[in-house]
Structures are given as C-alpha cells and as structure tokens.
Amino acid sequence: MFRLSKLADYGTVLLSYMARQPDRTYSATELAAEIGIGVPTASKILKLLARHELVQSVRGIHGGYLLARPAESISIAEVIEALDGPINVTECGAGLCARESECGVKGNWRRLGRIIQQTLSDVSVADFARPDFRPPPAAAAPAARSRRS
C-alpha cells in the first residue's frame, strides 16, 4: 500500500497553510499551533524542508520560515520526497526486495510508480492550498478504461 508518513502529511498541510500568505514569515511555534502538531515535529519538518530549499529560514527577532519560492512552483512530490525520500509504490526499485531479480511484475509497479510520481509533480502547494482543489486526471486512466471496456 502506498502511504505517506505523518511527516509528509503534516508537511503538505504546513506548506499549504503558508501558501495562503506566502510573503509572511512564520515561527515554528505558530505553525505548530495552527495545524495542531507539536513544536518539535513542526521544527523537524521545517528543517527538512529548508534543507531541500522548499522553505527559507530567517534569523533574528522577527525570524522564522517562509516559502523559498512561489507556492505554484513547489510540487507535492517535492514535499513528499523531502520528508519521506523517493516515492515508491513497492519495495522493488528501491533495492529492498529479495525477489526483485526474478519478479515478473516489477516493471509494471515501476510504471505505476512513475504515473503516481508524475501526478504528484503536477500538483503544486498552491493547488493543494485551495479548498476547491481538483486533482489532475490520471495519465493512464483513459487507456486503462478502454482496455476494460
């Protein structure tokens, strides 16, 4: 099962919140309170996002964090990868499966993983911040439907 970690989930919520007022600087304490997580968790997420240049850390009395670039140019895939690492549907492709060398479906899982990766890359933090967000249609959906008909 493809599942995000809590950090990746909270990271998307955190950045979506920041995207509503992208020119503001936010403290980890403020963000933690707003999205309902602990300050240590918010700090950890923000540090990882800063390391991947998705947010920028500002020092000083009025310091905190702000988006490193426009929310429209930060993809949900980038957020997930910054917090969880590469997006994989299964362990194959990550070199973690003992049966990978003889697996007959690993290529199919990899193709499906690329579709998921592309779909997540097509969704920006700005898209996710909108309450009326509609995901883009899946790249392989029309072909898959026509084969089942």
Image (cartoon, rainbow, N blue to C red):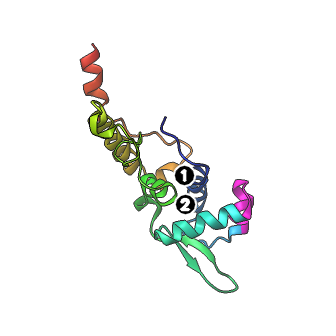
- In the image, is 65 to the left or to the right of 77? right
**How far across and how far down the image is residue 136, in percent?**
38, 40
Kindly give the residue lying farthest to the front in the view shown.
98
Residue placed under numbered mark 2 in the picture = 19
The local crowd at label 2, few if under 14, some if 14 to 19, many if 20 or more residues have their Cα within 10 Å, is many
Answer with mark 2 or mark 1, whichever residue precedes in sequence: 2
The local crowd at label 1, few if under 14, some if 14 to 19, many if 20 or more residues have their Cα within 10 Å, is some
Residue 24, visible in the rendered structure: yes
Magenta extent: 29-39
Identify which residue, 114 or 57, lies in the foreground.
114
Name the secondary structure under disc 2.
helix
Residue placed under numbered mark 1 in the picture = 129
- In the image, is 80 to the left or to the right of 41? left
Q: Are marks 2 and 1 in contact (CB under 8 Å)?
A: yes
**Residue 6 versus residue 29 in the image, above or below:** above
Residue type pointed to by label 1 = Ala
